[in-house]
Amino acid sequence: MIKAYSGIRKNKDTYVYVNGTPLSSDHHEAHKCNFEWSYQGHGPRHLAYAILLDCFNDKLLAQTYMTKFSMDVVGRFNQDKWSIDSNQVKEIITAYQSETKH
């Protein structure tokens, strides 16, 4: 099943969903910060980790790639509204893994 991840900013609050349900933010040591995107920092790395963990259900993979995924993808999301699906996430991580092998 393809998962659809999306985020929206309303006023100063951010909301992130997976298939229309709020994405859990309780599974990373940085969970005290809110999900954020469109810049580099703790909030975007937290979101990157949550997306990767939800998509792959693999804590080691999520920790390994969260910073690069945050810099390359989450940090470039549109500030107000964005979406990405699990197939896109998997393609990006597969490309990262290919880079590591060379």
Image (cartoon, grey):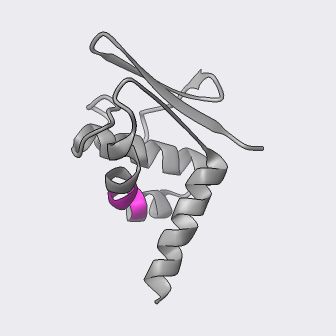
5 and 54: which is toward the camera: 5
Confirm whether residue 28 shows in the render. no
Q: Give the image quarter of residue 33.
A: top left
> What percent of the width, then of the height, locates residue 11?
30, 10
Residue drawn where x is 40% and y is 65% of the image: 64
> What percent of the width, then of the height, locates residue 59?
48, 57
11 and 43: which is toward the camera: 11
Residue 4 in the figure: left or right of residue 37: right
- Viewport quadrant of the N terminus: top right
> What percent of the width, then of the height, locates residue 13?
32, 15
Q: Main secondary structure of the magenta part?
A: helix
Residue drawn where x is 46% and y is 63% of the image: 60
Residue lying at the far bottom in this picture: please name it.
Answer: 102
> What percent of the width, then of the height, locates residue 5?
57, 35
Q: Does residue 46 lie above or below 24 as drawn? A: below
Residue 49 belongs to the span the image colors magenta: no
Q: Does residue 22 lie above or below 82 as drawn? A: above
Q: Does residue 54 lie above or below 36 as drawn? A: below
Residue 32 in the figure: left or right of residue 5: left
Picture mark count: 0
Residue lying at the far right in this picture: please name it.
Answer: 1
Residue drawn where x is 40% and y is 56% of the image: 69
Instruction: Please report the bounds of the magenta region as a residue range.
Output: 65-69
Residue drawn where x is 43% and y is 41% of the image: 27
